[in-house]
Every structure is written in structure tokens, then in C-alpha cells.
Image (cartoon, rainbow, N blue to C red):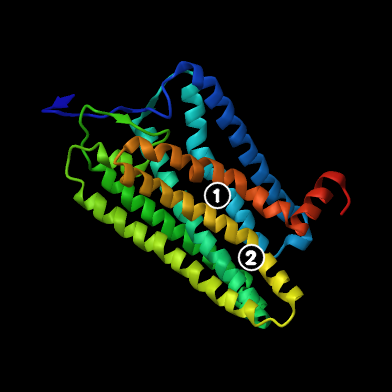
Amino acid sequence: METGNETKILEFLLLGFSEEPELQPFLFGLFLSTYLVTVFGNLLIILATITDSHLHTRMYFFLSNLSFIDICVSSTTVPKMLRNIHIESRVITYGGCITQMYFFLFLTALDDFLLAVMAYDRFVAICHPLHYLVTMNPQFCGLLILGSWIISVLNSFSQISLVLRLSFCASLDIPHFFCEYNQIVQLACSDTFLNDIVMYFAAGLLGGGPFIGIIFSYSKIISSICVIPSALGKHKAFYTCASHLTVVFLFYSTSLGVYFSSFAMHNAHASAPASVMYAVFTPMLNPFIYSLRNKDIKGALKKLFCGKP
């Protein structure tokens, strides 16, 4: 039903990366293989931390949560994209688009908080080792995870509630491979001022807050490492943080790249390739980053598959 130039929206069109038919098999194979590696790689991390009693520590508890979130982030966007490529369709229903936006906002915010929690865990372990078991007790760790979930859910719910009040015109083409929040808001015909205010406020508070916490934690960690007298001690302390620092760098550099690329180039299509990095490839790389140089994870995986440590 139409009212003026506004339409009751039933579906959107995801334009993806390319309309060239000959590229579709390549894209399907690329993203299918990436998704499978992401799921199985992160599942292995979770299984290793569950089955090996030596990994029943705070650090690996947070790592298994991160792996679970990475699986969910990829599962929010990639399967729908693969289905659309396979059936040669670009359609996503209005309800499907809202659902995809909700979970993507929720999971990326939760990912951000969890990285900050892991940085705090390393800060306590290195800067206050004698108080580590008391400070990072199981109840407190559970509260950190629960608080991250609650804040992420409330943020996602508030932003999606504002999207539901928007009206849309006839142009329903989304220059992206999933329903990205900013792209949907830009398609609206009604006033989006409140949406923009809440979006920037949430980005500053939920993005900037954890990032400042990470910077603070690692500034203290670096100061503590510098005063360690032995070179071996410094290397050992830094070794425990190297994997997490790499993941933090990947997460923030790729997510910021999405917005900088779209603003700098004034082109909505520019953010789609950049989004692939933090929505698809970063969750795939995390298991490799945490396992390749981690003797505990490699030992647990060897024990899991070979039956011996």
C-alpha cells in the first residue's frame, strides 16, 4: 500500500560486491571456505578450552567466549550472502533485515567489550599478580561477561527500535552484502536526526569507552614490563599479551576503516569491501592468532585429536 511517495516495505535488495555473473562462483567459493574455516577454527578453540583442565583459567574462559562471538558474527551475515549468491537473488525481507541488524549490532558491541575485559585481565595478571586470583574470581568474571551482554543487548534494542519508526521510499537498494545499520538509515525518507544522534552517542560510548580501557590497561602493562629486570621475564610477560594485541589491532583498524572509507570516498559502496575485513576475515583469523604461537592451545588440540599431550 502506498501513501504519497512512501511505501510499506516488505523487502530490500542487497547489491553485494559485484553484479558480474562470472564472479559469482568465485565469491561463493571464497566466502564459503572462509565461513567454514571460521566456524571450525573457533569451535576447536572452544573444545580445547573445555576438554583440557589446564585451560580452565580466566584468560581461556574469555577466549572461548570470544570464539563463540566470532562464530555468531560470521553466522549473522555470511549464510544469507551465500544463499543469495547460490539462488541468484539479492532479496532480504524487512523482518530478516531488522533481525540481521539487531544481532550484528549486538555481537560487534559484545566483541568490543570482551576485548576490553581481556585487556583488563592481562593488566591484573601482569601488574598485580599477587592479587590476580582474588580480583579475577569466578563471580567477578561472570559479572563482567553478564554486564557486557546486558549493555550490548540494550544498545542494539534501542537502535533497532528507532529504525522501526522510520519510513522508506521506493529506493530499497542496499550497496552492501548485509543490512548495515548506517546504510539502512540513509535509505529512510523520514527524519533520521534522532537515529544519527543515538548512533554517534553509542559509537562514542560503547566504542570509545572500551578502547580507552584497552589503551589504559596496556599503558600500565608496558610500564610494568619495562621495570622487569630480566630479558626473559620481559619476553614472557609480553608473550602473554601479543596475541590479544594483534586481535585488538585487527578489530579496531578494520572497523574504523569501514567508516573512514565511506566518509572519505563519499561512496556507500566503498564500505562494503572494508566491512568484509571485520565481519568475515577477522573472525576467521582470530583462532590462528591465538593458537599458532600458544603452546597451551596447541598442546590441548594435540591431546584432543591424538589422545596425548
The reply, left or right, for residue 112 in relation to residue 71 is: left
Q: Position of residue 246 (x, y in %)?
A: 59, 57
Q: How many marks?
A: 2
Residue pictured at 48% horizontal, 29% vertical: 81
The amino acid type, in three-letter code, at marker 2 is: Cys
Identify the residue position indicated by label 2 in the image.
241
Q: Position of residue 289 (x, y in %)?
A: 65, 52
Q: What separation in Å lies between label 2 and label 1 (alpha carbons)?
A: 20 Å
Identify the residue position indicated by label 1 in the image.
69
Q: Earlier in the sequence, mark 2 or mark 1?
A: 1
The reply, left or right, for residue 296 in relation to residue 89 is: right
Q: Secondary structure at mark 1?
A: helix
In this view of the protein, which residue sits in the foreground, 57 or 238? 238
Q: Residue furthest right?
A: 308
The reply, left or right, for residue 134 in relation to residue 174 is: right
Q: Which quadrant is home to the C terminus?
A: bottom right
Q: Residues within 10 Å of mark 2 (few under 14, many from 20)?
A: some
Residue pictured at 53% horizontal, 60% vertical: 114
Mark 2 against mark 1, which lies toward the viewer?
2
Q: In the rendered view, would you say 118 is above or below 273? A: below
The amino acid type, in three-letter code, at marker 1 is: Ile
Do we see residue 139 in this rendering?
A: no
Q: Which quadrant is home to the N terminus?
A: top left
Residue pictured at 73% horizontal, 56% vertical: 293
Q: Secondary structure at mark 2?
A: helix
In this view of the protein, which residue sits in the foreground, 303 or 2? 303
Q: Position of residue 35 (x, y in %)?
A: 59, 36
Q: In the rendered view, would you say 193 is above or below 169? A: below
* Residues at discs 2 and 1 in contact (Cβ within 8 Å): no
Do we see residue 52 in this rendering?
A: yes
